[in-house]
Amino acid sequence: MATRSRAQPTPDAATDPARSKPARLRAELFSPTLSYLMEAHNGLSAKIVEEAGFKGIWASGLSMSAALGVRDNNEASWTQVLDQLEFMSDATTIPILVDGDTGYGNFNNVRRLVRKLCQRQIAGVCIEDKLFPKTNSFVGEAQPLADIDEFCGRIKAGKDSQTDADFVLVARIEALISGWGLDEALRRAEAYHRSGADAVLIHSKKSTADEIFAFCREWAGRSPVVIVPTMYYRTPSEAFEANSVNMVIWANHNLRAAITAMRAVSSRIMREHGLIGVEGEIAGVKEVFDLVGQSELTQAESRYLAPQQQRPRAIVLAATQGTKLGPLTANRPKCMIDLRGEPLLRRLVATLNESGVRDITVVRGFAKETVDLANIKTVDNDAFAATGEVASLACAEAALDGDCVVSYGDILFRPYIVDDLIGAEGDIVVVADARWNSPGHRAPDRQIDRVKCGRAFTGSYLDEGPAPLVAIAPDLPSSETHGEFIGLVKLSDRGTSLVKAELARMRADGSIASADLPDLLTRLMAQGVPVSVLYITGHWLDVDDAFDLAKARNLM
């Protein structure tokens, strides 16, 4: 019986993390015991191979092509294969031997391929002595083989181009597959060995390993022998060991297993129109997260990301019917009128979500059962017909906790307004439109909540931020009006505490039922609580009547 061909690497070198991936693959190739490589075709399957305990990965050309939905005929370009390999290498710590087909061309293609593989820490490449573009070995009969001298040139070019001294080049011999016989296989093996190949892969598509073992006996361990027992899978591994095989490649079984499992799951879900039957039989989402290292990202975020500003919650006051809209609100509240296929409230909620505000409580009243959007909480003001905005806010007092945005339920605005409001300094900040009296802004007889501030809007990008609120009321003289309150307020943690305290006083003195938000703000200022105004210039609207509705639909 032939003796094994062995070189300098020691057995423990295969698992030494201090050694390069090519060095560890070389150690596996020259190990005194039989080594195994398992197929993978992308980063996830490569992780699974490493998790299973294999010391090396076979990056199968068939599997990578099939995973991309193309044939194993070089239909996937070598750069597309390289992209997959980079993900596989980054995802794992064990070495990868890549199925390099024919080397994707002549000697020039091979040397460029090897340089690129070394850059990505791929441990080795196996190239086969066929013509480019290749055809899978199990398709057809008597495939033509490359000229020996030309293929030896590919081997020499690859070895001359490696940038890691331990990079492994395996020469794959197709003579048995193509029916050229044992003598031709040995002749080619010897030529490839002399040209610098680190190992030879002898391939067969027979159902027994007889011709493989015949080759091994004649080869007599002149260099390591690699096999792919896909067709002669019944042969026990002990027989490979006894016949001086150095490395066994399980070539495509993860891909084939995935096809079987995906077909079964897809068919069952289609048949049953549900997930109950399969959910307990497939990997959980947490397993996916574990495989891809989600916990590491969470730890890294805590180390490298600056603390994120906590986004506030929101309370939307949407209890009123909106009688000025006539029959449009006969059976639904104003917040649910249609704006080009969506309720007004849904667009308002989407804008808040876009700014990171996701904990939203809506105060319902008229036709409350129609306010049933997803991803909102609701509380009810069943006395909506006899009460005002502050009574509705009091219904949502449990949500008045920490930073909070309070919004009317009939307004629309650009997301940047919420972003600027959240970032504005101050415990209580209201938004006011400095273009309150611009032509065409609204019907001239419309009553609005006017604000008087300690500083008028200058229009400068160097504006000093929120201005102090002096007064807010619908009857302020135009000469003292600096803007229109749009129905949007930000409260800090301290601000919510101040508001809740004032709500308690208003309950006690009986003023809460009829009060609106300007009344609440006026009471707070009377007690010395600073209220600030964030100026905007348009980019919002409220929907109160048919004139507003037409503007809103045009805006949408």
Image: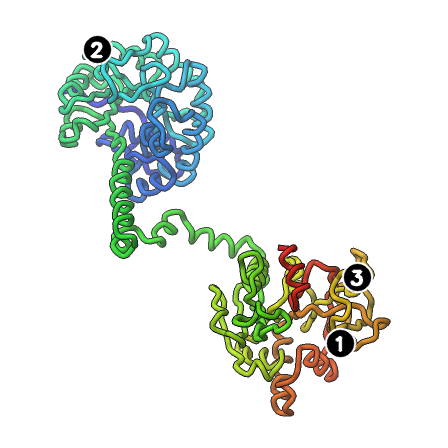
| Tag shown at residue 415 | none
- Residue 511, given in percent of the width and then of the height, sits at 65, 88
Q: Amino acid at mark 2?
A: Trp
Q: Residue at x 26, y 30 (%)?
A: 249
Separation of marks 2 and 1 at Cα, in angstroms: 98 Å
| Tag shown at residue 180 | 2
Callout 3: few (<14), some (14-19), or many (20+) C-alpha neighbours within 10 Å? few
Location of residue 148 with respect to 421 vertically, above or below: above
Looking at this rendering, what residue extends furthest in the right direction? Answer: 479
Horizontally, residue 396 falls left or right of residue 146, namely: right
Looking at this rendering, what residue extends furthest in the front direction? Answer: 327
Q: Amino acid at mark 3?
A: Ser
Location of residue 395 with respect to 15 vertically, above or below: below
Q: Nearer the viewer, residue 259 or 544?
A: 544
Q: Nearer the viewer, residue 233 or 168?
A: 233
Q: Is residue 357 visible?
A: no
Q: Amino acid at mark 1?
A: Pro
Q: Is residue 431 visible?
A: yes
Label 3–label 1 contact, CB within 8 A: no
Callout 2: few (<14), some (14-19), or many (20+) C-alpha neighbours within 10 Å? some
- Residue 495, given in percent of the width and then of the height, sits at 64, 75
Tag 2's secondary structure?
Answer: loop
Q: Which residue is mark 1?
A: 474
Separation of marks 2 and 3 at Cα, in angstroms: 91 Å
Callout 1: few (<14), some (14-19), or many (20+) C-alpha neighbours within 10 Å? some
Where, quadrant-wise, is the N terminus in this rendering?
top left
Tag 1's secondary structure?
Answer: loop
Q: Nearer the viewer, residue 551 or 140?
A: 551
Separation of marks 3 and 1 at Cα, in angstroms: 17 Å
Q: Which residue is mark 3?
A: 438
